[in-house]
Image (cartoon, rainbow, N blue to C red):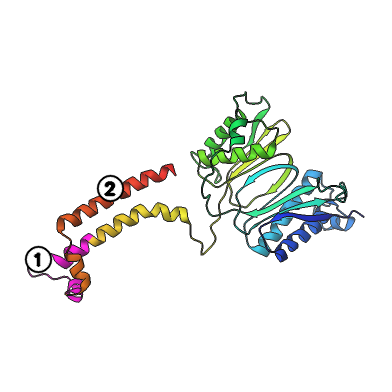
């Protein structure tokens, strides 16, 4: 009987949760990949699956377990040779190596099936500049003739994003003309950075000759491409949890908030300080004589008008500047 060993390579999760996922990987892998007669009887089609179908069944089953145990939406990836560049939520990522007996871990820790489980973050954060190694590795070269886009969302698909999906295909092509695929991990990191710079985040990139993925249900702009035997999978996905502040959206609202506050202050001053024959606003009735009214009325009308105009101009300028950050 085949014995599957597993070990945690790295994790951002607690010890108890990490142990649960590690044990789940071993058990599900045994059940999906090493099918017994009893397992086949439970299958509706009752037929033996190919290696590709077994591994796809494995990542899909593991994702189902994680979504139910730790709430949706998880990405699960596995592969022998895998380069990946994926942004993950704080405390929601784990890498595990599985050994079905093909490797002797007592002599070397190398080898084994790599499994990556993680959740997307709610936002990208600060985009890091190109490293010196990436700058040195960049060179002008011809896009490999074997490069082709195997699948991409059509315009009528919910996964298609106008101005993003097409740009992603262009970015992949450009990166292949600048960077070699010899180091799959290096290329994946470079491609993800270029995608993030070219289009809206959050991007996830997988590169390898043999890998399988069960992504979150609502990914967008998912593209599968290949260069010979090497496969490339990129998609866009972010996940804001309930009760979590979305910093990006808050920053987008700041310009409007500045203008609204300035306008409210202008209206309040007009109602609290300027006399109109036979009319006294209810707000002035309650606040007349208070320190708040005195402070507000000390501002000259021209100064207040200038503040509102300045807020309008500042809000518009800030909104334009956000396009570059």
For the residue pair 253 and 68, the one nearer the viewer reads as: 253
Secondary structure state at the residue bearing disc 2 = helix
> Which corner quadrant of the image does residue 7 belong to?
bottom right
Residue position marked by numbered label 1 in the rendering = 276
Mark carried by residue 244: none
In this view, the residue in front, 72 or 293, is 293
Left or right, 107 with reference to 254: right
Question: Is 193 placed above or below 247 here?
Answer: above
Quickly name the residue at label 2: 313
Q: Quadrant of the C terminus?
A: top left
Measured as percent of width and height from the top left, residue 38 is found at 88, 58
Q: Is residue 268 left or right of residue 316?
A: left
List the single residue furthest toward the front. 132
Is residue 277 covered in magenta? yes
What's the residue at 19%, 70% (across, down)?
293
The residue segment tinted magenta is 266-288
| Vertical position of residue 104 compared to residue 144: above or below | below
């Amino acid at each position: 009987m085949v014995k599957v060993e597993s070990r945690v390579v790295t994790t951002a999760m607690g010890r108890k949760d990490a142990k649960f996922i590690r044990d789940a990987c071993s058990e599900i892998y045994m059940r999906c990949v090493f099918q017994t007669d009893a397992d086949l009887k439970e299958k509706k089609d009752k037929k033996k699956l190919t290696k590709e179908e077994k591994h796809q069944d494995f990542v899909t089953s593991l994702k189902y377990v994680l979504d139910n145990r730790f709430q949706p939406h998880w990405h699960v990836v596995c592969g022998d040779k895998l380069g990946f560049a994926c942004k993950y939520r704080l405390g929601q990522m784990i890498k595990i190596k599985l050994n079905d007996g093909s490797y002797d871990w007592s002599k070397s820790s190398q080898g084994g099936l790599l499994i990556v489980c993680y959740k997307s973050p709610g936002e990208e954060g600060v985009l890091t500049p190109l490293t010196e190694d990436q700058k040195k590795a960049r060179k002008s070269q011809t896009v490999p003739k074997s490069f082709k886009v195997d699948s991409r969302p059509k315009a009528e698909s919910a996964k298609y994003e106008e101005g993003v999906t097409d740009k992603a295909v262009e970015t992949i092509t450009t990166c292949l003309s600048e960077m070699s695929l010899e180091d799959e991990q290096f290329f994946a990191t470079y491609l993800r950075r270029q995608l993030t710079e070219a289009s809206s985040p959050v991007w996830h990139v997988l590169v390898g000759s043999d890998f399988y993925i069960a992504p979150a249900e609502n990914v967008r702009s998912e593209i599968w491409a290949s260069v010979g035997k090497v496969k490339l999978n990129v998609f866009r996905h972010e996940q804001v949890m309930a009760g979590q502040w979305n910093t990006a959206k808050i920053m987008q609202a700041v310009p409007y908030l500045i203008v609204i506050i300035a306008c409210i202050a202008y209206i309040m001053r007009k109602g609290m300080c300027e006399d109109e024959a036979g009319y006294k606003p209810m707000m002035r009735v309650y606040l007349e004589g208070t320190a708040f009214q005195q402070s507000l009325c000390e501002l000259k009308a021209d100064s207040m008008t200038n503040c509102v105009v300045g807020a309008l101009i500042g809000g518009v300028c800030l909104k334009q500047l956000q396009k570059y950050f």
